[in-house]
Image: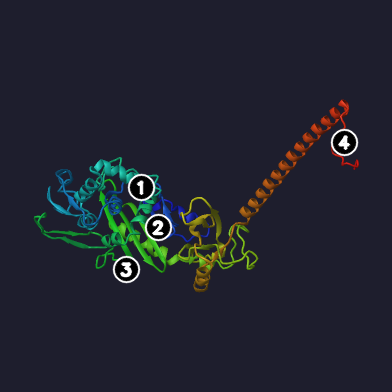
């Protein structure tokens, strides 16, 4: 029945038709751009199970050194069901490093590792959960609420495919987390704080030498509870595209075949376009920017450039000239003057940052000669320039008018006083002129 659910992206104009899959909810997102290539019920609130752990690991990487010593409390270890919940077998009171804990979390899906990591970073699991929800909100999640650090079922612990893709986008931007999420086996040796060797193994069938091994895989994390069913979040990279796939509420082993089908769909039907290379003559927003080869203002080196690393993602049937753009002056990175958002038939396909060049003329000239072919240049916004010029002109005109008015008023007042004095002199019969004449009356 779930296979018959509509795929929203298949209704998009001139968009490649995606596969019909059995998962209740699924998304394929391009990680570099955030562009959605495939969507099926991506905002449905569903249970994530153990894919929750990628958020736990992401927060741990941001808040703890890898060589920190993590103590596994009695609550962290014994609050899980050792018969049914995934674990790595560590005992209460034992200690391992944060790095070892993360491998246990992501490779062995160890639930006690999620608990101990949360306690180590925030002092308690409940405080760590607050941090999880805060981080999710920062990443743009709107359909999620986390209650546990490991994904053990709770009816108030839920997410959506879209939100998990946002979390995965941040997770898979970290090289070490990618390495951990692609590791099939890991050993934690005996030490002064560990009584027995612990070997953790991944059940992920997308890994090398497994049943559904996928050669372009960057990393992947599985999840399962009887309520959530099978969940899977994965990342693959090929031909300039970095794809994230999230599968929620599927039956095994279809979570793997769904993922492979969506990766195949993405890599076969879409391509990356470098904005700075493709946009050789394009004028943003129909004359919003202008270029000039004149040196009338002195050095004509560019003031603004498009980030040469920024790309957009288009169907293979589309070209760069088919996209539309919109400028955003407010929500770009701090070093950016503006951000260009691109759409294709109404679907967001990526953004490019317009950056301020902070070099002197000589350095700029050298850089331009080296990177001229790679960097498309945009100049000052003509509308802003004209507005500024008009505003300054109005201000100067008003200032000059005010000064002239004050001078006329002051002159008129002085003239009235002078006339009054002359009248009084004549009235009193005083001839002031004789006091100023010379001895000859001249």
Q: Are marks 1 and 3 in contact (CB under 8 Å)?
A: no
What's the residue at 20%, 57% (across, down)? 100
- Point out which mark residue 215 bears: 3
**Residue 265 sits in quarter:** bottom left
- Point out which mark residue 316 bears: none
What's the residue at 39%, 55% (across, down)? 27
Image coordinates of residue 31 in percent, x first then y, are 40, 59
Q: Can you tell which of label 1 and label 3 is closer to the viewer?
A: 1
Q: Are marks 3 and 2 in contact (CB under 8 Å)?
A: no
What's the residue at 37%, 51% (across, down)? 161
Instruction: Indicate the secondary structure of the residue bearing disc 2.
Output: strand
Instruction: Indicate the secondary structure of the residue bearing disc 4.
Output: helix
Q: Which residue is mark 4?
A: 434
Q: Can you tell which of label 4 and label 3 is closer to the viewer?
A: 4
**Does residue 1 appear anywhere in the picture?**
no
- Comes first in the chain, label 1 or label 3: 1
Image coordinates of residue 383 in percent, x first then y, are 63, 54
Q: Which residue is mark 1?
A: 136
Q: Is residue 304 rendered to the left or right of residue 18?
A: right
- Comes first in the chain, label 3 or label 2: 2
Image coordinates of residue 349 in percent, x first then y, are 48, 58
Instruction: Indicate the secondary structure of the residue bearing disc 1.
Output: helix
- Comes first in the chain, label 2 or label 4: 2
Out of 390 and 171, give the one closest to the viewer: 390
Q: Is residue 323 rendered to the left or right of residue 199?
A: right
- For the view shown, which residue lies furthest in the top direction? 428
Q: Which residue is mark 2?
A: 28
92 lies above or below 322: above
């Amino acid at each position: 029945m779930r296979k018959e659910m509509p795929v929203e992206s298949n209704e998009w104009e001139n968009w490649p038709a995606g596969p019909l899959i059995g998962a209740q909810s699924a998304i394929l997102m391009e990680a570099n751009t955030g562009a959605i290539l495939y969507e099926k019920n991506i905002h449905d609130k569903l249970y994530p199970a153990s894919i929750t752990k990628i958020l736990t690991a992401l927060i741990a990487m941001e808040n703890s050194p890898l060589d920190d010593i993590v103590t596994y409390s009695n609550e962290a270890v014994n609050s899980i069901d050792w018969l049914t919940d995934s674990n790595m077998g560590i005992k209460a009171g034992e200690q391992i490093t944060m790095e070892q804990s993360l491998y246990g979390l992501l490779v062995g899906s160890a639930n006690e590792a999620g608990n101990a990591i949360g306690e180590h970073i925030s002092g308690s699991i409940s405080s760590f959960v607050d941090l999880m929800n805060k981080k999710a909100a920062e990443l743009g999640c709107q359909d999620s609420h986390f209650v546990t650090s490991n994904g053990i079922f709770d009816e108030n612990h839920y997410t959506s495919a879209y939100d998990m893709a946002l979390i995965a986008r941040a997770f898979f931007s970290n090289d070490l987390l990618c390495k951990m999420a692609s590791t099939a086996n890991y050993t934690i040796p005996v030490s002064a704080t560990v009584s027995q060797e612990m070997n953790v193994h991944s059940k992920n069938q997308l890994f090398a030498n497994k049943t559904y091994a996928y050669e372009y895989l960057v990393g992947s994390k599985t999840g399962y509870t009887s309520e959530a069913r099978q969940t899977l979040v994965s990342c693959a990279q090929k031909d300039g595209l970095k794809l994230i796939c999230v599968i929620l509420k599927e039956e095994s082993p279809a979570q793997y075949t769904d993922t492979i089908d969506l990766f195949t769909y993405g890599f076969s039907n879409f391509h990356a376009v470098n904005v700075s290379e493709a946009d050789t003559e394009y004028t943003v927003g129909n004359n919003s920017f202008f270029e000039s080869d004149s040196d009338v203002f002195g050095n004509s080196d560019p003031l603004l450039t498009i980030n040469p690393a920024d790309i957009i993602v288009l169907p293979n049937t589309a070209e760069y000239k088919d996209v539309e753009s919109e400028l955003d002056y407010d929500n770009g990175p701090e070093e950016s003057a503006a951000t260009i958002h691109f759409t294709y038939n109404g679907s967001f396909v990526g953004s490019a940052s317009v950056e301020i060049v902070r070099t002197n003329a000589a350095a700029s000239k050298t850089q331009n000669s080296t990177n001229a072919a790679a960097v498309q240049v945009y100049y000052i916004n003509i509308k802003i320039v004209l507005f500024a010029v008009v505003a300054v002109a109005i201000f100067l005109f008003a200032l000059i008018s005010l000064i002239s008015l004050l001078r006329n008023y002051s002159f008129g007042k002085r003239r009235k006083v002078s006339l009054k004095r002359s009248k009084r002199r004549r009235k009193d019969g005083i001839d002031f002129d004789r006091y100023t004449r010379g001895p000859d009356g001249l």
